[in-house]
Image (cartoon, rainbow, N blue to C red):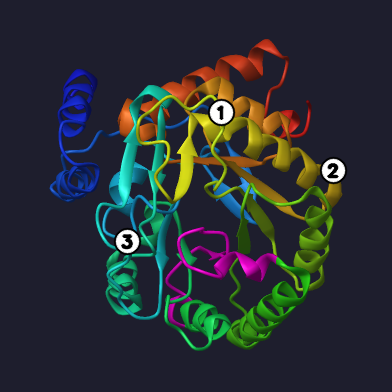
Amino acid sequence: MSADLHGLATGLLRRFDPEEAHKLAITGLKLGLGPRQDGPDDPSLAVELAGLRLPNCVGLAAGFDKNAEVADAMLAAGFGFVECGTVTPLAQAGNPKPRLFRLTEDRAVINRMGFNNEGLEPFAHRLARRERVRGVVGANIGANKDSEDRIGDYVTGLSRLWGLSDYFTANISSPNTPGLRSLQTRAALDELLGRLAEARTALAADGTDYPLFLKVAPDLVDAEVGDIVEACVAHGLDGIIVSNTTIARPETLRSAQKGEVGGLSGAPLFEASTRILRLFHQAHGGRLALIGAGGIASGADAYAKLRAGASAVQLYSALVYEGPGLVQAIKRDLTLRLRADGFTTLPEAVGAA
C-alpha cells in the first residue's frame, strides 16, 4: 500500500469511534496491510541503548500493541524498536466505555483504558512465535487492578516473559489504575525495584540478562526526580522512560473533550515531558539510559528530546493523526538535523541542548 493510500486509510479510521478505529488498525496490520520500509536506515540514526543495538532511535510506545499482535508489522514499518503491552498477569476488561477520546483541535488523546489486555499467556505465546532476528521488541508489564500483591504482579510478568522479550519496562505511572502512581514514592519504589532485582538475578543465573526500564509520570515534583534516579541505580535498572500520560489539563486545550478523566497524551504533553526529561538527564550523571516520550509528532520534536538527554524516543498518539508513515518522516528530518548541526552519529547529539 502506498503512502497516499495509508494517509487515506488513516483519515478514514478517524471517522470511527477511537477504540473501534484502533481495533481496525490492528486487524489491518495483522493482514499485512501496513507500510513497509524499503532499504536500511541511515547509519547516523543507529544507537546502542542499554546494550540493545537499534537501527534507529524511533520506537513505538506501549499502548498501541497491548497484546503483542503486530510488533513485527511495526518494525517493518520502520520503527527501531517496539514496546508491547501494558500486559498484566490476568486478563482484564479495563475501565467502562467510552474510555478513549480524540482531542482533534489539540492533536491530543485522552484515555482511561485501565490496562485492558488479554493477559500474560496469550502475550507470551505470541512473543514465542515471532522471529527474534526481526528486531527489538520489549514488554511493558503492569499490575492487575484488583491484585492483592501488585509488586508480585510485576515479578510474575518479568518471570513469565523472561527469554521472550528483548527488554522489560515496569509501568508504574498510568493514571488509570487507582493507586498505581503511589509506587513512584521512594519507599514503595525501593520495595518494587528490590523485588524485581532479586527476581532478575535469579532468572539471569544461566548467563542471560535483559535490560529493565522504569516508566515514570510527567507529573512528578522536581524533588522526586533525584530519588527515582538513585533508586533505579541502587537496584541495577538500566534506564527510565520519561514519560507516561499526564493528569494535568493545560489551559491551551480547546477540544470539547478536554474535561474527560484520564491520561492526556499528544502535542500538549510535549513541553512538560521534555522539561522532566531534562531534570532526569541532569540527575542521572551518565548512569542510566533515558528514553524520551510524550508529544512527539515530528523530527523537530524527536530531536528536542535527544538534545534534552534521551538516547532514544517513543511515540504513539501522533499516529492517530499522521498515520504509520510518520516514522519515516521523522527519521528523514532527524538525519537532516544531525547533519546540519555537524553531528555524524546520533549519540553525539544526546544532551547537547
Please state which amino acid type lies under the numbered disc 2: Gln
Q: Residue at x 75, y 30 (%)?
A: 348
Q: Is residue 7 left or right of residue 281?
A: left
Q: Is residue 254 magenta?
A: no
Residue sitting at x 18%, y 34%: 13
The mark that comes first in sequence, 2 or 3, is 3
Q: Quadrant of residue 329?
A: top left
Circle number at residue 251: 1
Label 1 neighbour load within 10 Å: few <14, some 14-19, many 20+? few
Q: Which of the image's four quarters has the N terminus?
A: top left
Using the image, determine if residue 156 lies above or below residue 245.
below
Q: Position of residue 160 (x, y in %)?
A: 44, 82
**Residue 68, which numbered label?**
3
**Residue under numbered circle 2:** 282
Determine if residue 351 is in view: yes
Q: Name the amino acid, label 3.
A: Ala
In the rendered image, residue 274, in percent from the top left (x then y), is placed at 67, 35
Residue 237, by quadrant, is: bottom right
Q: Is residue 38 visible?
A: no
Q: Secondary structure at mark 1?
A: loop
Instruction: Give, as a single range, the part of the protein colored magenta.
Output: 160-184
* Quadrant containing the C terminus in the rendered view: top right
Q: Nearer the viewer, residue 331 or 111?
A: 111
Could you tell me which secondary element the residue under label 2 belongs to? helix
Question: Splitting the image into 4 quarters, where does residue 123 fall?
Answer: bottom left
Image side of residue 298 versus residue 3, left or right: right
- Decide which of tag 1 and tag 2 comes sooner along the chain: 1
Depicted 336 relative to depicted 314: above or below: above
Mark 2: few/some/many CA within 10 Å (<14, 14-19, 20+): some
Q: Amino acid at mark 1?
A: Glu
